[in-house]
Amino acid sequence: MRIDSHFHTWQHGKNGAIWPTPDWARIYRDFDLDEYQRTARACGVTGAVVVQASPTDEDTDYICRAAEQSDFVKAVIGYVDFDSEHAVARIGELRQRPKMRGFRPMKFMGDADWLTQPQYAPVFDAIDAEGLIFEALVMIPHLPSLARLAANRAQTPIILNHAAMPDIKPETFPAWKDGIAQVAASANVSCKLSGLWDQDSQSTVDDQIAPYALHVIECFGPERVIWGSDFPVVKMHGDYAQWVAQCERLTEPFGAAAQAAIFHDNAARIYGIG
């Protein structure tokens, strides 16, 4: 059994979908739930978490409706505009959706320290008050700030998306490695084993991906790593089955219990999937 902790669905020009743009040619088309489910089920996936793809309220409303109509989709991670005066009210509204589990703002191109800026404290307070998850879509420069946020908000479940989207390059590896270790020091943070093909289409083979996957598992431990496909973005540089197979190979040295945790049990626990 597997739970896919990270997939997207969209319809271009509808439901607030403003991404991907034409420069993402391989995925510049509609991706519906039926296509995703066929792909995932063929790889032994029994349930999934749908994640917002566009920074619009309409996109989140769309994936909430889709999830409510699907037994396969077990949980939703939505978008909320942290800079909106209505952010707190929006969190309260979306909390009423039966599969809503948390929020992911799209500020990964923002200032390195945006996570700890005081104007966002009420939004994080609202997430805490509703018992929801903060999903951190960040890059290497944000990791020290994320580490401070996690340490100061030990009650907040935080999930680092795509291991901070590292470039698979020797020159950026030391900063990424140190940043991951800082974030992992807080027990309230988990990390998705996903998205490692996203930044560089030439870096998809085991020897190139292994240092990143292994460092994540070593820092967070198998009990705080959650596998995800990042479908359909994974199709930019390969396919779903290839990513599953690679993650199986890279996690095999940690043993069957660790693999069960990474591929299923951790997501079931953290997202409250029965």
Image (tube, rainbow, N blue to C red):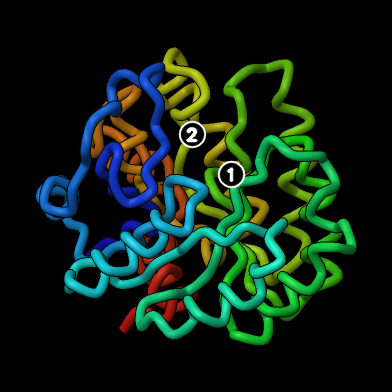
Q: Which mark is residue 196?
A: 2
Q: Residues within 10 Å of mark 1 (few under 14, many from 20)?
A: many
Rendering quarter of residue 70: bottom left
SS of the residue under disc 1: helix
- Kindly identify the residue that appears in the image at 28 percent across and 21 percent down: 26
Report x, y in % for residue 218. Answer: 62, 51
- Kindly identify the residue that appears in the image at 56 percent across and 82 percent down: 92
Dot 1 or dot 2, earlier in sequence: 1
Q: Residue furthest right?
A: 118
Report x, y in % for residue 131. Answer: 59, 84
Mark 1 sits on what residue? 163
Please indicate whether residue 81 sits to the left or right of residue 56 in the image: right
Residue type indicated by callout 1:
Ala
Residue 26 can be seen in this image: yes
Rendering quarter of residue 90: bottom right
Asked whether disc 1 touches disc 2, contact meaning CB atoms under 8 Å apart, the reply is: yes
SS of the residue under disc 2: loop
Q: Residues within 10 Å of mark 2 (few under 14, many from 20)?
A: many
